[in-house]
Image: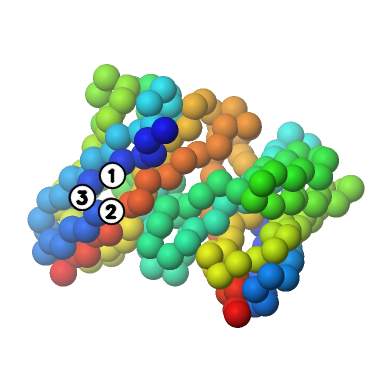
């Protein structure tokens, strides 16, 4: 089966610019996650969707980050305006459900560099 | 914050078993232990998970102590392709993964 798709793979922008990332989860997966991974650290959950509703966005910096999952399939994560500290890899993951036995499948990530 | 403690790095000879320890002394009764790994420039990959009993699949074995305060991931015959960061995670309610820094495993020929 096809895995989680993300685009673009790499993005370089200047601070105060805007950027958007796209994710297409595995077909049939109701739950979608966005993670931020800063160099040398483990991934940190930014937001979790169940279908097209937000389950957890407690770690999302809402003054500059936004995410949506229209129609409960694809999702976009936007940063506006970007700061230097937003340089990181942004990972999208999906799972069939939210129970304890549901493994998450990760995409390859988008590497963002803010200059 | 992550609820697990792992050594920062480990080395293993190719073809030998790699034993990766993890401490999770504050784990609660209904929380699972999950292991993921992340190969360089890729997203994390699920390996195995367990609640109380030892588990084995085609990738690895998971040994959980009887008091559930620690566990060991075993890669029975490590290869160079197993070089990665290994994350031990206690699964929180709602399928929320909280990653720590993990263990860098270097498999050497």
Q: Residues within 10 Å of mark 2 (few under 14, many from 20)?
A: many
**Dots 1 and 3: beta carbons under 8 Å?**
no
Nearest to N terminus: mark 1 or mark 2: 1
Please indicate whether residue A57 sits to the left or right of residue B105 in the image. left
**Dots 1 and 2: beta carbons under 8 Å?**
yes
Q: Chain of mark 1?
A: A
Locate the C terminus of chain A by quadrant: bottom left
The residue shown at (41%, 22%) is: A28
* Inter-mark Cα distance, 1 to 3: 6 Å
* Inter-mark Cα distance, 3 to 2: 6 Å
User: Quick check: do tags 1 and 3 share a chain?
Assistant: yes
Q: Residues within 10 Å of mark 3 (few under 14, many from 20)?
A: some
Across and down, in percent, residue B17 comes to 74, 66
Nearer to the camera, A10 or A35:
A10
The residue shown at (85%, 52%) is: B65
> Element under label 3?
loop
Q: Chain of mark 2?
A: A
Q: Can you identify the residue that label 3 sits on?
A: A8
In the image, residue B19 sits, relative to residue B57, either above or below, namely: below
The residue shown at (55%, 56%) is: B37
Nearest to N terminus: mark 3 or mark 2: 3
Q: Can you identify the residue that label 2 sits on?
A: A110
In the image, residue A69 sits, relative to residue A86, either above or below, namely: above
* Inter-mark Cα distance, 1 to 2: 7 Å
**Dots 3 and 2: beta carbons under 8 Å?**
yes
Please indicate whether residue B77 sits to the left or right of residue B37 in the image. right
> Element under label 1?
strand
* Residue B7, quarter of picture: bottom right
Q: Can you identify the residue that label 1 sits on?
A: A6
**Residue furthest to the bottom:** B109
In the image, residue B107 sits, relative to residue A46, either above or below, namely: below
Is residue B18 visible in the rendered structure shown here? no
């Amino acid at each position: 089966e096809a895995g989680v798709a993300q685009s673009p793979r790499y993005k370089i922008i200047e601070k105060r610019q805007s950027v958007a990332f796209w994710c297409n989860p595995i077909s049939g997966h109701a739950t979608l996650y966005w993670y931020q991974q800063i160099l040398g650290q483990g991934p940190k959950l930014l937001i979790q969707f169940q279908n097209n509703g937000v389950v957890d966005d407690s770690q999302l910096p809402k003054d500059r980050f936004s995410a949506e999952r229209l129609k409960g399939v694809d999702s976009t994560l936007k940063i506006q305006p970007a700061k230097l500290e937003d340089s990181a890899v942004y990972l999208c993951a999906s799972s069939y459900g939210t129970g304890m036995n549901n493994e998450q499948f990760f995409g390859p990530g988008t590497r963002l560099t803010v200059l | 914050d992550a609820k697990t403690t792992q050594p920062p790095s480990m080395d293993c000879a190719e073809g030998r078993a790699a034993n990766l320890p993890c401490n999770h002394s504050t784990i609660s009764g209904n929380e699972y232990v999950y292991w993921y790994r992340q190969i360089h420039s890729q997203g994390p990959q699920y390996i195995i998970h367990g609640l109380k009993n030892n588990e084995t699949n085609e990738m690895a074995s998971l040994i959980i102590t009887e008091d559930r305060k620690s566990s060991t991931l075993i890669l029975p015959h490590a290869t160079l392709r197993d070089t990665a960061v290994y994350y031990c995670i206690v699964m929180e309610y709602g399928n929320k993964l909280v990653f720590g820094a993990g263990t860098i495993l270097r498999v050497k020929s």
